[in-house]
Image (cartoon, grey):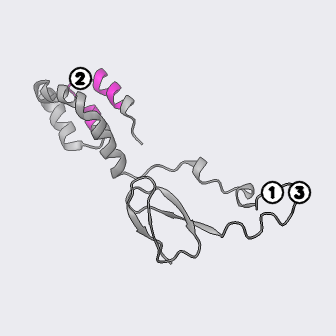
Amino acid sequence: MRSVGITYLIWFLAPALGIHRLYCGRIGTGLLWCFTGGLLGIGWLVDLFLIPSLVREANLREPPLFNPRHYDRSAAAHAPPPPAHGNPQAHVGVAPAHRVIYCTHCGSPMQVPAGAIGHQYACPRCRTILEVPA
């Protein structure tokens, strides 16, 4: 994920070189900025207002990188919940089994019921409608 703050820092420290555009994945305009001095400084100044949208588009174009906090495969993550108030049967039958699917647009993980094959759900991050595969 790219950061608006880091992009502004690059924009400020390397004026009119287009490095901030290369950072956001805009290779063509980044090279154009580099060879023309940010379109003689005019494009560099306009980018002051365009950087938030450049970063947002770059983050939507590329799926998020692996984050180990979201993928805890330890035994504790798969253990049943502890019984409530000493009653060993308190958690039985409360929640159906779930599975994780990933958005085809932004790559965000999403938890759906295990028996929801063919049902449609909206991605919580980008609101793309997804059909649960078999």
> Residue at horizontal 51%, vertical 58%?
109
How far apart are labels 1 and 2 at the CA level? 57 Å
Location of the N terminus by quadrant is top left
- Which image quarter: residue 48? top left
Q: Where is 60 relative to 104, above or below?
A: above
> Residue at horizontal 32%, vertical 39%?
55
Kind of residue indicated by mark 1: Pro
Residue 10 in magenta stretch: yes
> Residue at horizontal 18%, vertical 31%?
34
How far apart are labels 2 and 3 at the CA level? 64 Å
Residue 61 % position (x, y): 33, 51
Q: Which residues are magenta?
A: 7-21
Please name the predominant secondary structure of the magenta segment in the image: helix
- On the picture, is 17 further left or further right than 66? left
Nearer the camera: disc 3 or disc 1:
3
- On the picture, is 31 further left or further right than 93? left
Name the residue that disc number 1 marks.
82
Name the residue that disc number 3 marks.
86
Q: Residues within 10 Å of mark 2 (few under 14, many from 20)?
A: some
The secondary structure type at the circle numbered 2 is loop
Q: Where is 72 relative to 9, above or below?
A: below
Residue 28, disc: none
> Residue at horizontal 40%, vertical 63%?
104
Residue 98 % position (x, y): 61, 67
Q: Where is 5 relative to 26, above or below?
A: above
Residue 15, disc: 2
Comes first in the chain, label 2 or label 3: 2
Comes first in the chain, label 1 or label 2: 2
